[in-house]
Each structure stands twice: as structure tokens, then as C-alpha cells.
Image (cartoon, rainbow, N blue to C red):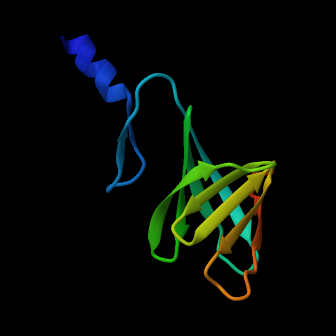
Amino acid sequence: MEALATAAMMSNVDVSAQVVLSLQGSFERNIVQYQCEGLEPFSVDFINAAPNFLAIVPIGPDRLVFVTTMSGSGARYVSGQYEFWTKGSDATLTDLMAEPQAPVNCSEVTDTP
């Protein structure tokens, strides 16, 4: 019984004090730091549990849950009016309700010794 409880606890991913995901099967969690034009650096928490792929992205004072959707190239995540699109170490962040829509270019921050 204790092993089952331990296994159940291991499948929970606490991505913040407010969001707990219960996942079955294997999953991968990656935290990636980005630097975007005109913004302070921020971290994105990627939760990959096929067929579901999520990204927790800070927008203003909030952390929004983005889900993947179809894309021709890279990984396209959406949450409400926002789109976060990654390809390799580059990304764009777009407010789809803004006029004109002007994607903000971002790059992964890599640690250099």
C-alpha cells in the first residue's frame, strides 16, 4: 500500500503553489529561461506528457497555462489571447488581440562558464 501511495505521489507535478497536475505514465518536465526583447528574463515550465504538452508562461503578474496546438514547424502554444511559439532555441510571444500583432522575439538563455 505504501509503495502505491509513493508511486501516486511521484506522478504529481507541482508547477506552482496553485497548480498541481496528476499525470499517468511517463512525462518530462523542463524549465527554460528566456530573454525577450524589452522584457526581463523569465522561466517557462514545459510539461511534456504525450499527447498533452503544456507550457507555464509568466504574463504580467500571472502564470498562464499554455497548451500545444497544430503548427507547421516548432511547437506552438496558446493560452487565451496569447501565443508562445518555440523553434529550437528561439521563440516568439504574441498578444493575438493587439493591433497590430507584433511578436516579441525571444531566445533561450544559456549559462556560460
Question: Which residue sits at x=26%, y=14%?
Answer: 4
Task: Tell whether 62 sits left or right of 96.
Answer: left
User: Percent x, y for residue 42?
Assistant: 61, 65
Foreground residue, 47 or 74? 74
52 to 96, vertically: above or below? above
Foreground residue, 7 or 49? 49
Quadrant hosting residue 105: bottom right
User: Percent x, y for residue 83?
Assistant: 64, 65
27 to 5, vertically: above or below? below
102 to 7, vertically: above or below? below
Task: Tell whether 40 sits left or right of 81.
Answer: right
Inspect this view and state whether residue 63 appears: yes
Question: In which quadrant will I find the N terminus?
Answer: top left
Task: Tell whether 108 sits left or right of 53.
Answer: right
Question: Which residue sits at x=74%, y=57%?
Answer: 109
Q: Farthest residue toward the left?
A: 1
Question: Which residue sits at x=64%, y=85%?
Answer: 98
> What is the number of callouts on the image?
0
Inspect this view and state whether residue 48 appears: no
User: Percent x, y for residue 58?
Assistant: 53, 66
Quadrant hosting residue 22: top left
User: Percent x, y for residue 36?
Assistant: 73, 71
81 to 78, vertically: above or below? below
Quadrant hosting residue 96: bottom right
Foreground residue, 51 or 65? 51
Question: Which residue sits at x=30%, y=24%?
Answer: 8
